[in-house]
Amino acid sequence: SDFKELAMRRKDYAKSSQKMAGNEQIAAEVAANPSGIGYVGLAYTQAPGVKVLTIDRVGPDKASIQAKRYPYARPNFFYTN
């Protein structure tokens, strides 16, 4: 996954980690679990109960991602026929 590449130096997730079906589920679980940690798309960083962490004092927002200041961002491509 992209997160493994960007943040975990290609190490596997812990066997005890929970795998969720998508951003909405991850945001809801993290918000409900005081010890929860997860990663979601930028749109889900505003979900109630979710606290966004900074990296080197840079938070994930449109400007920092476009300026390539936020290190855990990657492009998303859509192809249509």
Image: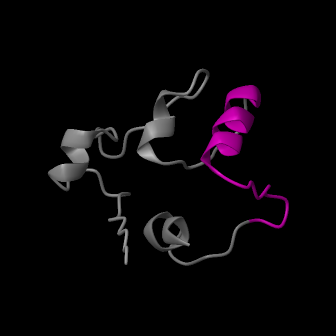
Q: Position of residue 30 (x, y in %)?
A: 68, 36
Question: Could you say which is closer to the camera, residue 38 or residue 8?
Answer: 38
Quadrant in which the C terminus appears: bottom left
Vertical order, 37 against 71 (above or below): above
Residue 19 located within the stretch drawn in magenta: yes
Q: Is residue 5 above or below residue 70?
A: below
Towards the viewer: 61 or 77: 77
Span shown in magenta: 14-33
Q: Is residue 18 magenta?
A: yes
Q: Is residue 25 left or right of residue 44?
A: right
Q: Residue at x 28, y 51 (%)?
A: 70
Furthest-top residue in this view: 48
Please indicate, yes or no, whether residue 69 appears anywhere in the rendered image.
no
- Classify residue 1 by image quadrant: bottom right
Give the side of residue 46 with respect to residue 80, left or right.
right
x then y, percent, for residue 59: 33, 38
x then y, percent, for residue 27: 63, 37
Q: How is the image coloured?
A: one colour
Q: Quadrant of residue 17?
A: bottom right
| Horizontal arrangement in the rendering, residue 63 relative to residue 30 (left or right) | left
Compared with 38, 21 (above or below) is below
- For the residue pair 10 and 50, the one nearer the viewer reads as 50
Residue 76 in view, yes or no = yes
Residue pictured at 73% horizontal, 55% vertical: 21
Along the line of sight, the residue nearer the viewer: 34 or 31: 31
